[in-house]
Amino acid sequence: MRTAATLLRMIKPAAITVLAWDRLLTAGREATRAVRRELRRAGLPPLEWYDVLLEVERRGPSRPRDLQRWLGIEQYNLSRLLTRMERAGLVHTMTCPGDARGQIVQLSDAGRAARQAMWPAYATAIHGTLEQRLDDAERIALAGLLARVA
Amino acid sequence: MRTAATLLRMIKPAAITVLAWDRLLTAGREATRAVRRELRRAGLPPLEWYDVLLEVERRGPSRPRDLQRWLGIEQYNLSRLLTRMERAGLVHTMTCPGDARGQIVQLSDAGRAARQAMWPAYATAIHGTLEQRLDDAERIALAGLLARVA
DNA sequence: GGCGCTTCGATGCAGGTGCATTGTTGGCCT
DNA sequence: AGGCCAACAATGCACCTGCATCGAAGCGCC
């Protein structure tokens, strides 16, 4: 049961909140766009692949359901992502020994290479979007605030 | 011509930058997801429609090329968006008097009503994502930082 | 063992998005 | 006026995403 005050705040959040919200969405979108643009300009795979490659590289051979949780993406989405990536030769999958429902995903050499190849483009976007515009202290503050949001 | 130092920073930005970046993308995605979920739960139109409706409501009858700029979305995307919204009866379009290439988009009553109907769902998402987690000062700080990014 | 429930991952279908390109009109210059 | 380039909006095509659902395998219980 919500109090009247809570309801009021729900319906009409202070202007600053809406402003922050709007900028959050905008900044997130712009940032995403910036990476995609860089990646595409360099003829590299799409953004999502990077996250998967990095995660598998860090964690070692992984099961899709775990990747899904770690990456925070939808199950069907990951499923098709892995299909494409396997077709491109960046990962290998095998049925999970000990649980025939599941799979184990592992990086191929090409996958490792692709991840490395993608980093410069990724870094360019980060540089242009964040590093160039905020100083160290501001980046720390931003990271702290965003951690509480997400 | 880039200095070696700049290149180095491009290739290997400090960890805090990458962290902030990662959280920016994540927070943006989560926020977007939250609204979409609320809207869909309430059987309301998709997120993008809200922005268009709001913009046209604020600015008055507008031309697509302006909306495109104000909203920061792609031309083809807006074109199809407007097609769908018109089919749903939320906006009317007419050819622009004085420039037969262009159009004028205006809200219908249904459009105004839809915008209002969407707000509570939108507000719920804002409340849960931002308002509940950051206090006033933090929201101000966040808005300030994000303004510099986007 | 057999039954029902849950977990894991794949997939059919409808719809949205990105990219390139087109058609139309306006504006400008000669 | 005529020719040329730029601006505006639409669209064909391939691809991606969301949703619901499915089938297969594990798990617990009797």
Image: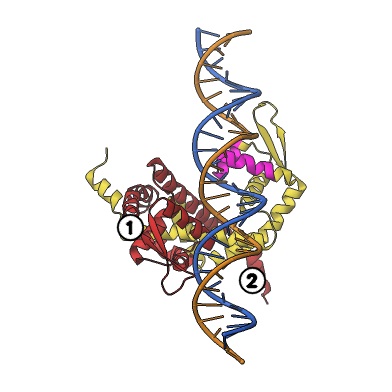
Chain colours: A yellow, B red, C orange, D blue
- Depth check, front residue: D21 or B9: D21
Residue stretch in magenta: A65-84
Q: Is residue A18 left or right of residue B9?
A: left
- Percent across and percent down for residue B32 are 46, 51
Above/below status of A99 relative to B30: above
Precedes in sequence: disc 1 or disc 2: 2
Q: CA gap, disc 1 to disc 2?
A: 37 Å
Q: Mark 2 lies on which chain?
A: B
Q: Which mark is residue B51?
A: none
Q: In this view, does A108 lie to the left or right of A138?
A: right
The outermost residue toward the right is A109
- Percent across and percent down for residue B34 are 43, 47
Instruction: Point out the image quarter for the N terminus of chain A.
Output: top left
Give the residue type at disc 2.
Thr
Q: Is residue A76 visible?
A: yes
Q: Which chain carries label 1?
A: B
- Depth check, front residue: B47 or A5: B47
